[in-house]
Amino acid sequence: MSDPAITPQLVQKHNLTPEEYEKLKGILGREPSYTELGIFSVMWSEHCSYKNSRPLLKTFPTRSSKILVGAGEENAGIIDIGGGLAIAFKIESHNHPSAVEPFQGAATGVGGIIRDIFTMGARPICSMDSLRFGPITPLPHEASTLTPERRQAMANNRRLFSGVVAGIAHYGNCFGIPTVGGEVYFDRSYEGNPLVNAFCLGVLRHEQIARGRASGVGNPVFYVGPATGRDGLAGAAFASQDLTDESAEQQRGAVQVGDPFMEKLVCEACLELLATGAVAGIQDMGAAGLTCSTCETASRAGTGIEIELDKVPQRAPNMTSYEIMLSESQERMLIIVKKGREEEVKRIFDKWDLPWAEIGQVTDTGRMVVRHGGKVVADIPARKLADESPIYQRESREPAYIAEVRKFTLAGVPEMTDPVGALKHLLAWPTIASKNWVYRQYDHMVRDGTALAPGSDATVLRIKEDALPVLSAELAASGAGKFEGERYIALAVDCNAAYVYLDPYEGSKIAVAEAARNLACTGATPLGVTDNLNFGNPLKPDIFWQLKESVRGLGEACRAFNAPVTGGNVSLYNQSPDGPIDPTPTVAMVGAIEKPEHITAQWFHTEGDAILLLGEPVDSKDPLLGLGGSAYLHVMHGLKTGTPPRCDLEIEKELHLALRALICSGSIKSAHDCSEGGLAAAIAESCISRQEARETPRPIGATIDLSGLEARRLDALLFGESQARVVISTARNDAVKVLERAKLLGVPAMRLGTVGGADLIIKSAGAEYKWPIMDLYKAWWNAIPDAMRD
Amino acid sequence: MNFAVLQFPGSNCDQDVVHVLKNVLGHSARLLWHKENSLGDADAVIVPGGFSYGDYLRTGAIARFSPVMAAVTEFAAKGGLVLGICNGFQILCEAGLLPGALIRNRSLQFRCENVYLKTLTRNSPFTRSVPEDKLIRIPVAHGEGCYFADAATISGLKANSQILWQYVNAEGQATEMANPNGSIENIAGVCNRARNVAGLMPHPERASESILGGVDGRLIFQSILEK
């Protein structure tokens, strides 16, 4: 089969602009071959090159004394956690594939991020997922007037939700990694463009860090893992364009098919191989497959690489060089082996019954040379391809809607007439409701490390010795790899995208602050952040403005919490024909917990315990009293507007410090932050979220007295989402002491009430509201399972 | 006691079992690769959970042909103690060492959550240390844990007290709500006629340390250890 002629149309089909094509020709000094055109097209896609976002990403804080491998250096960042141990973690999107084929799209998203972690030499020990879909149920006021079109759209949203969760469960459960949590939001802006951001974390000893470098001229290059097929052709390029019905249909073939069993074997074999010391460099074949792994490893090492495509194991007959280079078949690794130690590689991969092939070698030419059928089909300077993609400073303009948002006041929002109904509606709104339907499908316990399971503010993992990769004989003999005792880490992933939409800068600060607050609630101190920037089309100035403002807020907040960004992912072009998604900079934060006795959950424990609030009940400086962008306005009034709550990073920091100090003093029995649904939802969740076993909730009531508070509006007091607030409980006798200590630590604190009884009772000035606690539990626990039964 | 913990390609609870036997209970345990033909000096065998061979074809259907399974069959025939957990239970059923089969959960979804078990008989090496009337709180994590057997097999199991554990609610009743997978008679685990081979879907190795939320699972390992 002869290659097609390179025409302007063909260049355009490869998402390269005429200017980019000229740059490409300049690099080569000639016209590209068809294979080379394909190679440049994927490497210069946003997914691989960050060409539209790189100048912004450079503003992130990326350094701290604990960073061992920083952002952008390798496949994932690595942070020191003490005791000679380190963690590698990263988040990555698989949005477009999941829109087209939710099960495989999500599954391979999980597979890809797991590979990024064991590529670093770390043993993957947990994963999380941040998910966004269109609404799966109508809002209360929509229920009676739902059109057939809306009903159909919601059924489709449920199909995507169900498929994505099943795909994540399939891959993670079979691989044997606990999926320990995440977040799920439902909003109209994600209809037709769901978001699937997969996070993975692994652990290793400092000495075990592996590099994605093709170092050592003359070293052989090995391909390991299953054969290359036509699946996932140019997936990275597909992810870097707007999603339309037509593109989705055409691109179904761009979605890869995952095999978690194969990945488990590849992971175990790679960790075993790394322990031999025979590996000079290692990289997974993720986005842009063989292309990306070869040119990036050569670029990082400052070497060249030559490969022979006839030696690449192939699943389909007559594959062209273009197809082999661009395939994104899963579970494949590129390994650069120290010359003379090839037999060790073969022995280990044979033990695991895994295919391998020696496909080339490292050279000193600085070029990536690809041969097929005796001919050179690509010959490109590796560094220019991998690291010198075009970089754009896009035009940025504040979108028109922002002025409208700023004009919004509460004057037009009628006073609340039915607080009892409102709390039930909020708890049953799928974004707030219990996610048990999701995490009960994930094996969240395998590997015996899950100390605080999904269902609380953050998840807590303990790291025990067998969580670490195989120790090399050399390290074992020197005693350097000695295990010094278990460690504890907490993880959370957060982003309230409604806030980000309404004010990208402030909303992005909140995403970071909320993640840090969730960690603080479990007793953890932040170590670092990986972020996933999900935005619309960056060529549109108002979208680029969102991105720019968001990055400014993220950077500022990460600096405040001393949580450097260790890497992440940018997913642009998240638009369906209905428009862009709400800008969604997902923030995954990892923190350290000093002692196991500090691990704190969100639920109330014992009758008679005191309930306290840390932080101001309502932010009086906020003209919207925390109702801007709130779940309350959305669910009860159908509004997504108003300036979101203010995020004062100094106040947040003091709150988190005080909360951790109180937790370490041993007097805190539960801690839960106020987020969507405000104070009332936080208290209710603390009452109803304790679960002993299947069908065995342990809800407990509470009596709350807010009558002493001056409340300009009851809706703001109960459901406003002012930041920097945490509901805690203590033994009755500790309450006074804790209040005093909190004030000494510079944090406002007040007694809210007492745990106990079968009802949640809230007293406000002149009124008392009462909910049987089982009613609230059922509304919250069953909302998503009931919706998914339809 | 010396435990051999089998390791198939795709086993993923193997290290957890070794961790509990060694670090929590202080016994000797080693991983045994599926291509081995001998169990060595093992006093008892644990077939751990996971997705052996990716659960392709049918859960446990390929693993039963691994060389090590011939050694396990021989060991069991001589009265050696064999416990299968989750995928290990599925493998032992496929290998014919235990009656019945495990099919897809009735919900058609994977389920990972804590359940309560009632121990129906203390007359077995796997249940003898469980206190009378004690409910065991323990996690399940499986997609294919619905125990199934024909009526004759079930009545045989009952007649010979081979049903070791049932899913129950917190009050100890074997209700439909308490059953996470739709198993016949809420069966969570069974043993063979000779009572030296047993299997259960729940994971005792995940309920053996207080930091993981409970220690009831130790009762099952302690039963094996009790002489």
Image (cartoon, helix red, strand yellow):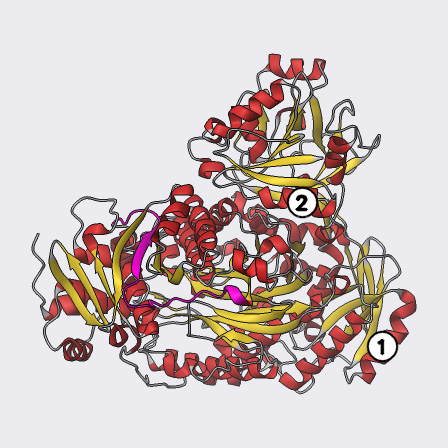
Looking at the rendering, the stretch of residues picked out in magenta corresponds to: A207-229
Residue at point 54% right, 76% down?
A67
Residue at point 75% right, 50% down?
A774
The residues tagged by marks 1 and 2 sit, at their Cα atoms, a distance apart of 38 Å
Residue A682 relative to residue A767: left or right: left
Query: In the picture, which quadrant includes the N terminus of chain B?
Result: top right
Q: Secondary structure at mark 1?
A: helix
Residues at discs 1 and 2 both on one chain? no
Taking the view exactly as shown, the residue that stands out farthest to the right is A733
Q: Amino acid at mark 1?
A: Leu
Quarter location, residue A577: bottom left
How many other residues sit within 10 Å of disc 2, few (<14), some (14-19) or many (≥20)? many
Check disc 2 and report the residue beneath it: B206
Name the spot of residue A502 as percent of width and height, x first. Answer: 50, 78
Q: Amino acid at mark 2?
A: Arg
- In the figure, B216 relative to A204: above or below? above
Looking at this view, is A646 or A710 the one in front?
Answer: A646
Give the letter of the chain under mark 2: B
For residue A222: magenta? yes
In the drawing, what numbered circle is on residue B9? none
Residue A185 in view here: no
How many other residues sit within 10 Å of disc 1, few (<14), some (14-19) or many (≥20)? many
Residue A355 relative to residue A24: left or right: right
Quarter location, residue A619: bottom right
Quarter location, residue A576: bottom left
Looking at this view, is B12 or A108 the one in front?
Answer: B12
Check disc 1 and report the residue beneath it: A739
Query: In the picture, which quadrant includes the C terminus of chain B?
Result: top right
Residue A246 in view here: yes
